[in-house]
Amino acid sequence: MGFTQANFLFGWVNSTERWRAILCELEDFLLTFLLKENNYFVTSAKERMNTRQIISYFDGYLPLDAPEQEALLSCVVERKVKRRQFILQENDVCRHFTFVAEGCFKMYGVDKKGTEHNLQFAAENDWIADIGSLHKEKPSKLYIEALEPSVIFQISKTDLWHLYNNYPKFDRNFRVIIENKFIELQNRMLQNISSTADERYETFLEQYAHLSNRLPNTQIASYIGITPEFLSKVRAGRAQK
Amino acid sequence: MGFTQANFLFGWVNSTERWRAILCELEDFLLTFLLKENNYFVTSAKERMNTRQIISYFDGYLPLDAPEQEALLSCVVERKVKRRQFILQENDVCRHFTFVAEGCFKMYGVDKKGTEHNLQFAAENDWIADIGSLHKEKPSKLYIEALEPSVIFQISKTDLWHLYNNYPKFDRNFRVIIENKFIELQNRMLQNISSTADERYETFLEQYAHLSNRLPNTQIASYIGITPEFLSKVRAGRAQK
DNA sequence: AAATAAGCTTAATGTAGATTAAGAGTAGCG
DNA sequence: CGCTACTCTTAATCTACATTAAGCTTATTT
């Protein structure tokens, strides 16, 4: 199962960043397809460990009973994702709701000048998707990119709808998950309108404490809505106190 | 049933804005209490019309069947609210999920300098609440205030939980409602980080087309995160084109 | 009807944060 | 191993928007 390098198929390509991304996508598509449709690649014992993680994640909400666990696992697809690999790009329709088991992602938009603006980070035991694109099956304006090598579980829209319709507990659990995300986002929105860069950085440190040493400063600056240069100044100011 | 003036009880008070607000709250509490606990005040035929509105609102989602409609109506409380009246104030715990049948509300936070920052407007057929405060039963940092004389339907947290537990369709419907609110808020967040005041005003006009002539400029400015003076300048600039 | 408050606009001046550029440290890659 | 590509920082200059203040118009209240 050493097929995690994109170039196992096309090793002869003089690979730039661009080519590599395309190849990764292609390979992932193939892997996903084969895994799901034919159960062709059998997951190893170690890999099967990971599925426990997504099951026990729900213990924090309404825990899943045996049939629900089985239903969830039967429609979830495990993927490994390399650093800098995209699981969503602008103009693509977002087709999966993604659970992060290991690693870290950023979701961002790009403005007219080409500057990236981070909307959300997602590390272990968090969900990420462009919910708007997923629901309305419209092209996304966002990118979701791995900041670290990661392991994820993905549910397609049809499978998720299937779960909702057959096991009402998922309606409940995802209602609560989304509500919590909404609360977080609303707090951030209020902060963003009403606070200085320094205060926003302070809040970032509180909210993403576990990520603050894991993320490069450029990513943090893009999240709190300032330039990396000004973040430098803010940090210098804080260090004096 | 002409008891919509606060001073029917305390007409002798030399009423300032402050006193009036307090009296309104008191009266509303009494009305709500009496309505719900004793069915003391019977709603008039015209008032009963309004309940149809909240039922048919759900036709846009999973429509409610007869028992669900009855369950909803039995725990919903109708209130009339005057302009400038608060249905939530800072440090209070938000106890209701509110459906706006008529009129218009703003939800806002106040920063250290005392400036208000609008997070959300809600007019006919929209929901409003500080979901964070409602869920966690923690004091809110927000205000919800009527911008116009309004008619609302409120559900308490316990009643809402009761609905969720007995009629799974409400889990579904509120999941979708919240998801849509999340999508809107996320779009706004992205906009806010990545656009100029002029572009944000443009987007406001698109998103709240039905409210743009109904809201004062000061409220719009507070929503898009600029001063009313600068909004004046932006509008002047747009008029030239 | 008069008084008070709320709302819109214009203009002068002030400031948080952007932009550009340049140097120095560090990580990934061939 | 050395090279290129990120990353962080400091500093000079620039700009989008804030602040203050004043005049005017339109609602609300008494």
Image (cartoon, coloured by chain):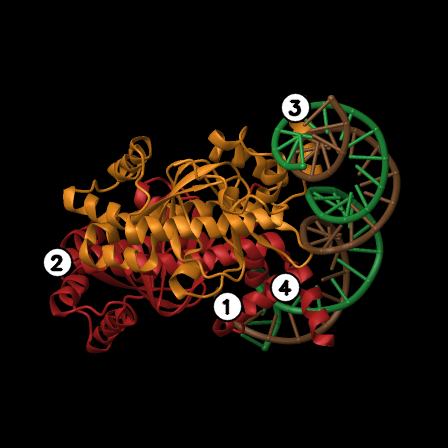
Chain colours: A red, B orange, C brown, D green
> Marks 3 and 1: in contact by CB < 8 Å?
no
Residue type, numbered disc 2: Asn
Q: Which residue is mark 4?
A: A199
> Dot 1: few (<14), some (14–19), or many (≥20) neighbours within 10 Å?
few
Determine the secondary structure under disc 2.
helix
Going 19% across and 53% down the picture, which residue do you hit? B167
Q: Which residue is mark 2?
A: A38
Q: Which mark is residue B82?
A: none
- Residue B170 placement (x, y as % from top left): 24, 51
Write down the chain letter for disc 4.
Answer: A
Q: Which residue is mark 1?
A: A207
Write down the chain letter for disc 1.
Answer: A
Q: Is residue B12 above or below residue B215?
A: below
Residue B13 visible in the current orientation: yes
Q: Earlier in the sequence, mark 4 or mark 1?
A: 4
Residue A94 visible in the current orientation: no
Q: Which residue is mark 3?
A: B239
Residue type, numbered disc 4: Glu
